[in-house]
Amino acid sequence: MAQPADETSSGTSAPAAGTPEPARGRRTHAERTAETRARIMTSVVEAIADLGFQKTTAAEIARRAGVTWGAVQHHFGGKEGILVAVLQDSFARFAERLSVIDRDTPALADRVSAFIDHAWEHFASDDYRSSFEILLNFTAEQRHTPVDKLAVEDFDDRTVVDFLDHLQSARGNATRSRNTRLAAIHSLFRYVAGQVPEAMARCQQICAVPTKKAAHQSMGYLEDAEMGAMLSSIDRNRRHGPRDHALVLFMYNTGARVQEVVDLKLDDLRLDTPPQARLFGKGGKDRACPLWAETVQALRRYLEHRAPSLEGCPHVFLNANGQPFTRFGIRYLVRQYAAKAAERCPSLKGKNVGPHTLRHTTATHLLQSGNDLSVIKDWLGHADMNTTHEYAAIDMKMKQRALDSCQAPTVKKGGKGRPRWLKPGILKWLDDLSQGAEIM
């Protein structure tokens, strides 16, 4: 390799003493590293834009970007480092377009770090993450702008309303799903308003978009015979029978939310005396639920046959591929056995049974057994007692007992025989009257 020419020997004056400078045309190691980082990050951003925020892996993004995974690890320390760098670059370009923040000031780094810490907590929720993905792709399509080029001024209340209408008309979302997406958008732009005061008016308009009133539907639950038919429909001698029986029985025993079942780890189970399960609910709150002896026996039988695809997988319930169950997988399984049970239990045919139906069933059966509402509140992990009170409104057995405790009012009969206007004489008189009213 040819050595670079010595500038002093070519007639170029040497730098003054005490002020060492790199030779002209020669870059320092720091400059070369910065250029490599910028090139990798640009390629990664373009790869993410091409994927359109589809669910993928970090290795796939690196492959599409044309960079080696070793280079990403060397310059950014892995996928977390490259993600933070991309977010910082994106927000710096947002700030530059808005002309409200100087990218060189320390406040920008603090602001971006605060956003990452704040948003990371919400991105852990599938509802929030998917809401932002759908909103970004919808707005990019409406503005004819790549997702990574969107700025704050591309969002307004009209855009949000059009997005919400799109959810119901094109994607078939129910009103409650629409309101859930809107809550995520409100949360995002409340944070933006606090970080960028210049965008306060725009954010206030977006946060003023109201939720849509939904028709109130009473919560559905299963009667004792229906729940028994559903458990009996599971063939425990089949390959996944022990798993399915343990899963449905565990959900009925604990009244757990479907996400709590998905997140359940082996360390959260205690199968010796006293048997219990530790569940992590909304807001990071955890609670302990006691387990029946039947549930413990079903879990022990399932765990004997549990076969994770990766050694050391901590999740309790795994799908057919040995991977942790998703919410949608559990929903499919519950609906499958509910449909099968409906063949022997006709009352199930008119019910839309899902994972949350089992939660309602647990609460209702606890109430029917004479348990106090405060006990049920703690059992289900409700934050508000008013939510638990709704189960008292759907319990038909309690309503029937209340009705039986009251005597029906006694109504006196108004006369003997048929009413006067039904007597034959009156009917004949009416017929004669109609015949005599002919127009001459």
Image (spheres, helix red, strand yellow):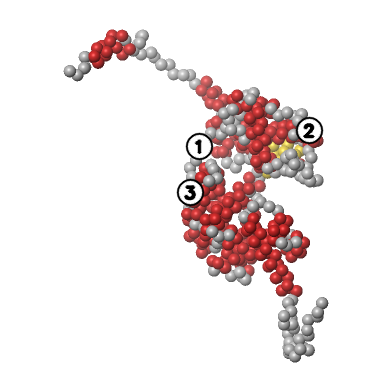
Tell me: residue 297, above or below residue 75: above
Does residue 106 appear left or right of residue 17 in this picture?
Answer: left
Upstream in sequence: badge 1 or badge 3: 3
Residue 419, quarter of picture = top left
Q: Are discs 2 and 1 less than 8 Å apart at CB?
A: no
Question: For this rendering, which residue is in front, 112 or 328?
Answer: 328
Horizontally, is 234 left or right of 101 in the view?
right
- Earlier residue among tags 2 and 3: 3
Measure the C-alpha gap from mark 2 to mark 1.
41 Å
Read off the residue under disc 1.
216
Tell me how far mark 2 sits from mark 3, CA to CA.
Answer: 50 Å
The three-letter amino acid code for the residue at tag 1 is His
- Amino acid of disc 2: Arg
Q: With respect to residue 423, does 295 lie above or below?
A: below
Using the rendered image of the protein, determine whether residue 356 is visible from the camera's viewpoint: yes
Give the residue pinned by disc 3: 210
Residue at left 75%, top 29%?
236
Provide the residue designation for mark 2: 301
Q: Position of residue 403 (x, y in %)?
A: 51, 23
